[in-house]
Image (cartoon, grey):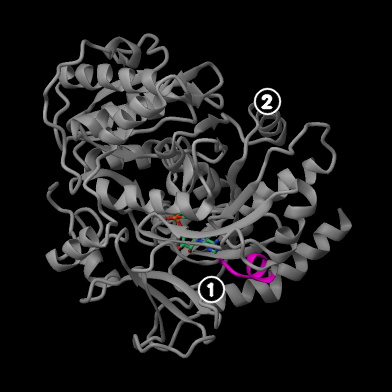
Amino acid sequence: MLSGCPTWPEEFARYYRQAGYWRGETFGELLRRGAEEHGERIALVDDRRRISYRELDARADRLTAGLRELGVEYQDRVVVQLPNIAEFFEVCFALFRLGAVPVFALPSHRLTEVGYFCEFSAATAYITTDTEAGFDHRELAAEVTAKVPEPPHVIIAGDPGEHPFHALEDLHAEPVADRAGPSSGDIAFLQLSGGSTGVPKLIPRTHDDYLYSFRASNDICGVDADTVYLGALPIAHNFPMSSPGTFGVLHAGGRVVLARRSSPDEVFELIERERVTLTAAVPPLALVWLDAAEETERDLSSLRVLQIGGAKCSEEVARRVRPTFGATLQQVFGMAEGLVNYTRLDDPEEVVLTTQGRPISPDDEVLVVDDEDRPVATGETGHLLTRGPYTIRGYYRAEEHNAAVFTPQGFYRTGDVVRRTPQGNIVVEGRAKDQINRGGEKVAAEEIENHLLAHQDVHDAAVVSMPDEYLGERSCAFVVPRGHPPRGRELIRFVRRRGLAGYKVPDRVEFVERFPRTGVGKTSKADLRAAIERELVPHLHEEKKRA
Ligand code: OOB
């Protein structure tokens, strides 16, 4: 087992195996079986290629051999930052077969994040692309190798250009038979946490636990070999990866279609051409698709299920799905740490429109508790705690943090505030963690506060959410200046230049003389949010009316 990864106590592991959740299968074997059972069927479609199960399997084998020749070994960490292209899966399965551990970065991550992932995980390699959405990832890779004390090998899917990097395509080598792979209890990859702390936390997921989560999701979401899944969200995110996502569909022998962009034009063309049956969106994206679908000439009738998750879906948006797409809405409330809840496809309309569903597994233990960890009555609002066969017992190399967010009994404190209906469905009511959910993209307040504090004219900073009609929430940075206040726009530019994902840059900056304090003298973010409601929101409404 990779060191620094807390795991399940043996009695739990034994039970999860006995109950048939953990079946001893690895990702590598999953694809081999897919090649045997579905051979010439198309597994993947991207904007350049159609790849069969047999071809994906063979290419993964050749890449496994090539990565090994380069010196990537069992349990080495490899930062993977790829857009929605077929190479993502070749790379994943090659690393899985090697037993090397991908660390999944998002395409929007920049020097701060990627540099941190490489350094913190002591990555052997960094696999990225040439250009994506007008951004040159090779330049980023050059900055990363200059910054990280022990720079990783850089591998480029596409053209390495003038840089001394490896081309992914050149790494394909003759496969070597009879090499032992990882075991199903090993860590398969490190997934990124939405986070609420200064630096992002890494989530260790095993072959056993992850395969269970998407195999069971397949049953709930009706995924089989006839499913055509459209990956429109960034595919390294847990939602489109495993709920049931691309891996669930590949497990079932279905077809994964990758959209490079998520605009209605591109997405609707793919739905029509590939006869897509299932896809997933965050609420703001679903809203854009709903508006465009009312106008489109495209035939979207193949779509059977539209999943919405990652942030709370308003009832208003939920109500439009069936009339607009003729598809069933499925609400998905999940987290990269594990627990995923779904409304079921045959649930009464009321449940689908107004709740975030219930857990995948009969052995997902869910507690709703008060501030003292005492269970609240059904229907009462409280903190959601969970443990189960696919929820981690701790983050990678984060002992101190783990002691705070996992109970001694191994329950994960999700930071979500929920209530449960008498039928057992969960309704998300809010959040206790210090995070902004910007239309499904999570921003850890402390991380951004640290960037602001690096500015010489910033004395103190507090980042909170402000309501937004489109994204649900945006970020507002309250700043106490040191002496001469900088301009808001200058501060925003300052944060952006530090090299971080665009969605983390504050949407608004407000200068104040001092922060409201709680009883124990901490900054009261509740009071700051209340000030936004009181002073900013009416003002924004006014601005909108005038526009
Ligand atoms: C998904 O995963 P993460 O790790 O990016 O974020 C998890 C957090 C949850 O703790 C919750 O605060 C929020 O995102 N969230 C929702 C939600 N789905 C996620 N809040 C309200 N309503 C929902 N439907 O976001 C994720 C992972 C797997 C499947 C789906 C989403």
Q: Which residues are magenta?
A: 350-356
Q: Is residue 424 or residue 123 the one in the foreground?
A: 424
Picture layout, residue 349 above or below residue 28: below
Question: On residue 425, which mark appears?
Answer: 1
Left or right: residue 169 versus residue 62 is right
Residue at point 60% right, 69% down?
A: 355
- Quadrant housing residue 539: bottom right
Q: Amino acid at mark 1?
A: Asn
* Disc 1, SS: loop
Horizontal and vertical percent position of residue 33: 31, 31
Q: Is residue 472 or residue 347 the one in the foreground?
A: 347
Reading the image, the residue beneath label 2 is 273
- Quadrant housing residue 537: bottom right
Q: How many marks?
A: 2
Horizontal and vertical percent position of residue 383: 43, 78
* Ligand 1 neighbours mark 1 (CB distance < 8 Å): no
Residue at point 54% right, 41% down?
A: 233
Q: Is residue 98 or residue 33 the one in the foreground?
A: 33
Residue at point 44% right, 76% down?
A: 523
* Disc 2, SS: helix
Left or right: residue 178 versus residue 411 is left
Horizontal and vertical percent position of residue 78: 25, 33
Dot 2 surroundings within 10 Å: few (below 14), some, or many (20 or more)? few
* Ligand 1 neighbours mark 2 (CB distance < 8 Å): no
Horizontal and vertical percent position of residue 500: 44, 42
For the question of whether residue 140 can be seen, the reply is: no
Task: Indicate whether residue 352 is drawn in magenta.
Answer: yes
Question: Which of disc 2 and disc 1 is earlier in sequence?
Answer: 2
Separation of marks 1 and 2 at Cα, in angstroms: 36 Å
Picture layout, residue 271 above or below residue 533: above
Q: Amino acid at mark 2?
A: Arg
Q: Looking at this view, name the residue that lies furthest to the right.
A: 546
